[in-house]
Amino acid sequence: MGIIGGGQLARMMVEAAEAAGVRCRVLAKPSDQSAEHLGADVDLVEQIDSAAVTAFAEGLDVLTFDYEPVDFGPYERLEADAFPVRPSVAALRFSDKAYQRQAFAEAGLPVPPFACVTTPQQCEAFAQDHGWPVVLKAPRGGYDGRGVVAVADLAAAAEVLDGQRLWVAEAHLDLDAEVAALVATWPDGRSVSFPLFDTLQSDGICVEVRVPSALPEPLRSEALEVGRRVAQVVGAVGMLAVELFVVDGRVLVNEIAPRPHNSGHLTIEACRASQFELHLRAVAGLPPAEPTLETPAAVMVNVVAHSDGPAGFPEVTLGDGVFVHDYGKTRRRNRKVGHVTALGTDVETAARDAHAGAQRVEAACLAADVGGSTP
């Protein structure tokens, strides 16, 4: 199996490869720092272009991705030659938020009120129906709060909209909760779902993921069903993460990612099979494994750099049931460089331990960056 890209998702896929029963090769650029720690066959190229992809695919059975903002051309040519690309180019197109919103609305999926706009006047017309502020989202390239702007009035909209670049305008919602449904789908249409995860955001960045979800059972089942419906519409083979809003007791689709996702990292320790093992099994067409939760509760907290520094975490001692994942990335302020997962008898206990672990790692990194001592 070939993996396009050498980031932390590729790193965790490779770590899951033995359990999934597959062998992985990775196509990466020298700037993909996680590639240095993959322990797999790695082809380093200056550009992941058509020639590099074509050469890389020779001798492989299937391709998958560490990230989804890719040039579709090389993969469309492989698909035209009946080479399996999973998720397919058709599924990858859903990474464009404008395409995604329109396709989901046409399919009858529950989505927030939205419009595709290019001018301040179009944004103002949307606001007349849904009120200010309006949330503007760039169709491609936005993550961790990037590419998302809340505008309070016409003048603020004019600072973002230039009459040319397309943005998705959405109503500003008062959220009850944010959750994630993760679904793995096989080439023959079979699928399995993880339990629903609660996600907590700060400034557009996911800071914490919890399981089991605190939603009441009827809403929990509804959210998982919406996730399965989204997976059918997208048609992605492999993992699909569906980020959902809960507003006034209704479940709405926020965004999707046709790949393993930050909201599913806690499955490595918390579930019988991780999202990475299931992704590899599905992409390779191997038998499913059970995504059963194997602990009463689990919480993942992202490790975010507070200063610039070298790759790698200083060694820290954490308690039993607390697990650190270092992505091997150079530290830059506000960059996610790893995560900590804690297992516990209940969510609050696991959250306490996960936050304490992440704080110790972050403090150790900060101390090392400024020349201090590791706590």
Image (cartoon, grey):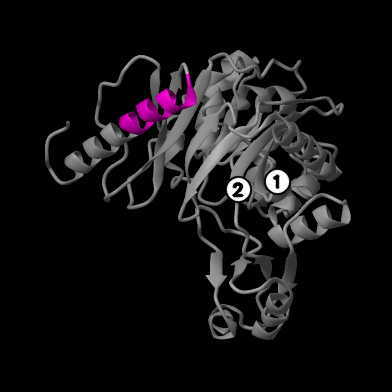
Reply yes or no: does residue 95 show up in magenta.
no
Q: Name the residue located 39 percent from the left edge and 49 percent from the top edge.
A: 335
Earlier sequence position, callout 2 versus callout 1: 2
| Other-residue count near label 2 (Cα within 10 Å), few / some / many at <14 / 14–19 / ≥20 | few
Left or right side of 165 for 268:
left
Asked whether the beta carbons under mark 2 and mark 1 sit within 8 Å of each other, the answer is yes
- In depth, the one of 297 and 190 nearer the eye is 297
Q: Is residue 341 something one can see in this rendering?
A: no
- The part of the image, by quadrant, that contains residue 157 is bottom right
Q: What stretch is highlighted in magenta?
A: 346-357
Which residue in the structure is indicated by mark 1? 249
Residue 360: x %, y % from top left: 26, 32
Does 354 appear above or below 65? above
Which secondary structure dominates the residues rendered in magenta? helix
Q: What residue type is labelled 1?
A: Gly
Give left or right: position of 272 versus 78.
left
Rendered residue at 59%/20% (across/down):
17
